Image (cartoon, coloured by chain):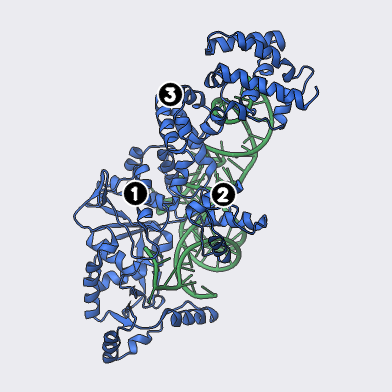
RNA sequence: GGUCCCAUCGUCUAGCCAGGUCAGGACACCAGGUUUUCAUCCUGGGAACAGGGGUUCGAAUCCCCUUGGGAUCACCA
């Protein structure tokens, strides 16, 4: 394809990198790589109130985790660099002002003095009259002298772009095709804000031009903005890049997948359960009532996480970081995200990033929006996990545990813990969930009387519980606590106590030591626990049920 | 409401641009089987061209309309 392809991903650091943004970044990266071009990262932090350094770092981490590394941009670890920076918009004010002066000189931009409140009134009027809001160009009627005077007085102002006269506007989008709109649909939008910062529209045009971006891939919510952008480019004499607008990602219920989904889930639960005050200390009464007073006041991430944990509800996974925490592998998330709107054809679905780079093209991007299907992601993760060698699985599980489950990372028999969980885990988290009994103290194991527990211990002609004393005695005799010894002991027990039915002895043992019907294979489970803990748990279980039910 | 975008199994999609294979695959689901639990694993199955008009010998594919869904209409990006 064309030479010098350069794409960019330009997030505003106001939250976390969510899956939609991640997919855009992946496509940008893949397109650049597929065409021997460069991928650039730019931080759009012109919103002084909402941008944060913490969020910026989060974006770097999330992108790095996915192995989407930028050739140009902020220098972090082994990514970034380039000499068309700085790559933070907040540090490019001079550049924007320079371009703004040109526009002012050409009389393609003008000062406007309406207050936000005044504009709000106009907007409401427009809504009531069932038409789209357009700025009425009132400030354009001001005389030069008045404007000069207002500015000298320090009257608060913005700068607006003066949309030139002309015919309809057409942009040829690489995904959507030709899109045409009447010029009158574009109003004189603000390009410089009252705080002296450029708006998104202005900064993005200046930066994309100065950084020589050739292809702009972005979410379809920007399709309408494109007309503002091409107008600005024409006014400034910039070349128009190629545009590719990617459809949105939705939740399974059809709603737009958004960063607000977590907040929504929490609100719903709180409302449905009539919870009137904060159940945890980390959310103050003030924070709670502020949150409850308006849907626009979202809880901080930490607060939301803590509250969800307290209420015992699962927050929907929407950010890249959520999937990392949940124990998915980055290459799987990347793979799955690619498939939401693009496919390589030939019935191929599972692939790595080398394959992606080789095959990626804009003309295979689907126009229609996609729903995010966690079940398929999970299935992909399972497949990928199973393809890992034992050593690789162990090292990656260890890595994950070090970050999210240090008590498991510290396990002396980590190797066995890993191998025992390899083929039965769909995510890294699965391994610690079904093996949580390992890190629980012997004296803290409890046995909820659920159906499977009752079935294994209390039901039947000869109950599992009644076999317990014999099992305990047999285990006491096992000298070396090895897989072979345990196995042979269990088989012997099965033939003497249960006509060779291994399940009849294994399942009561499993429940006794694990506190529930699910654990790794029984031999591994017992070795992981050790002989002493195994015996203690068996005894405690026997005592507990013997005392509660006079069987 | 104005403007713009979109429309193949429950879901992601292949097929469409260059009309002509029982509309293919994956996930999910259902039924069997393997397995000491859970999870895997194996076999089989049901499942879609939104509706209506054209064009054509022939339409999922090209055109129009209807319906449905979505985006956007900020001194946020």
Tell me: residue A121, above or below residue B71.
below
Res. A279 mark: none
* Left or right, A423 with reference to A8: right
Whichever of callouts 1 and 3 sits on the residue coming sooner in the sequence is: 1
Q: Badge 3 is on which residue?
A: A390
Residues under labels 1 and 3: Cα distance?
30 Å
Residue at the image point whose x is 39% and y is 83% from the top: A114
Residue at the image point whose x is 52% and y is 32% from the top: A432
Whichever of callouts 2 and 1 sits on the residue coming sooner in the sequence is: 1
Where residue A351 appears, as percent x and y from the top left, is 40, 37
Q: Badge 2 is on which residue?
A: A308
Quarter-wise, where is residue A55 in the image? bottom left
Residues under labels 3 and 2: Cα distance?
35 Å
Chain B shown in which color?
Answer: green
Front residue of A242 and A383: A383
Q: Secondary structure at mark 2?
A: helix
Q: Quadrant of the C terminus of chain A?
A: top right
- Disc 2 sits on a residue from what chain? A
Where residue A489 appears, as percent x and y from the top left, is 61, 10
* Left or right, A176 with reference to A373: left
Res. A60 mark: 1
- Disc 1 sits on a residue from what chain? A
Please check whether the numbered discs 3 and 2 fall on a single chain.
yes
Q: Does residue A458 appear in the picture of this structure? A: no
Whichever of callouts 3 and 2 sits on the residue coming sooner in the sequence is: 2
Quarter-wise, where is residue A550 in the image? top right
Chain A shown in which color?
Answer: blue
């Amino acid at each position: 394809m064309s030479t010098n392809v350069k794409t960019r991903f330009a997030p505003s650091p106001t939250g976390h990198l969510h899956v939609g943004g991640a997919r855009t970044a992946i496509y940008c990266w893949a397109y650049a790589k597929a065409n021997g071009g460069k991928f650039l990262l730019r931080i759009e932090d012109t919103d002084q109130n909402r941008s944060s350094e913490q969020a910026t770092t989060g974006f770097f981490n999330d992108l790095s985790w996915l192995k989407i590394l930028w050739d140009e941009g902020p220098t972090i670890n082994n990514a970034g660099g380039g000499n068309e920076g700085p790559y933070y918009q907040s540090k490019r004010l001079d550049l924007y002002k320079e371009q703004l002066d040109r526009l002012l000189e050409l009389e393609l931009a003008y000062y406007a003095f309406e207050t936000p409140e005044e504009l709000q009134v106009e907007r409401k009027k427009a809504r009531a009259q069932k038409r789209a809001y357009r700025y009425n160009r009132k400030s354009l009627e001001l005389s030069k002298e008045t404007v000069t005077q207002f500015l000298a007085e320090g009257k608060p102002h913005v700068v607006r772009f003066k949309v030139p006269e002309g015919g309809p506007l057409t942009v040829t989008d690489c995904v959507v095709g030709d899109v045409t709109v009447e010029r009158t649909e574009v109003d004189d939008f603000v390009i410089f804000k009252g705080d002296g910062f450029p708006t998104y529209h202005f900064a993005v045009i200046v930066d994309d031009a100065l950084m020589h971006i050739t292809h702009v891939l972005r979410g379809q919510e920007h399709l309408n903005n494109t007309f503002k952008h091409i107008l600005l480019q024409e006014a400034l004499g910039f070349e128009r890049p190629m545009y590719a607008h990617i459809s949105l990602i939705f939740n399974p219920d059809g709603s737009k997948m958004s960063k607000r989904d977590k907040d929504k889930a929490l609100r719903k639960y709180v409302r449905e359960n009539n919870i009137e005050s904060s159940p945890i200390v980390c959310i103050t009464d003030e924070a709670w009532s502020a949150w409850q007073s308006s849907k626009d006041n979202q809880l901080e991430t930490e607060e939301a996480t803590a509250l969800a944990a307290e209420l015992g509800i699962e927050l929907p996974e929407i950010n890249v970081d959520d999937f990392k925490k949940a124990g998915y592998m980055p290459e799987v998330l990347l793979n799955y995200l690619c498939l939401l709107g693009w496919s390589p054809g030939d019935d191929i679905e599972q692939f790595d990033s080398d394959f992606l780079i080789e095959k990626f093209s804009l003309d295979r991007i689907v126009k229609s929006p996609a729903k995010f299907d966690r079940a398929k992601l999970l299935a992909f993760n399972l497949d990928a996990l199973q393809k890992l060698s034992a050593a690789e699985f162990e090292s990656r599980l260890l890595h994950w545990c070090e970050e999210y489950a240090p008590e498991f990372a510290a396990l002396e028999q980590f190797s066995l813990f890993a191998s025992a969980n390899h083929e039965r885990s769909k995510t890294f988290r699965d391994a610690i969930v079904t093996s949580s009994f390992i890190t629980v103290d012997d004296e803290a194991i409890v046995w909820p009387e659920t159906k499977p527990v009752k079935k294994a211990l209390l039901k039947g002609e000869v109950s599992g519980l009644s076999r317990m004393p014999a099992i305990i005695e047999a285990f006491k005799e096992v000298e070396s606590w090895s897989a072979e010894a345990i196995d042979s002991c269990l088989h012997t027990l099965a033939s003497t106590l249960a006509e060779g039915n291994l399940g009849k002895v294994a399942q009561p043992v499993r429940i006794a030591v694990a506190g529930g019907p699910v654990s790794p294979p029984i031999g591994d489970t017992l070795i992981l626990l050790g002989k002493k803990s195994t015996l203690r748990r068996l005894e405690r279980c026997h005592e507990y049920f013997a005392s509660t039910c006079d069987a």
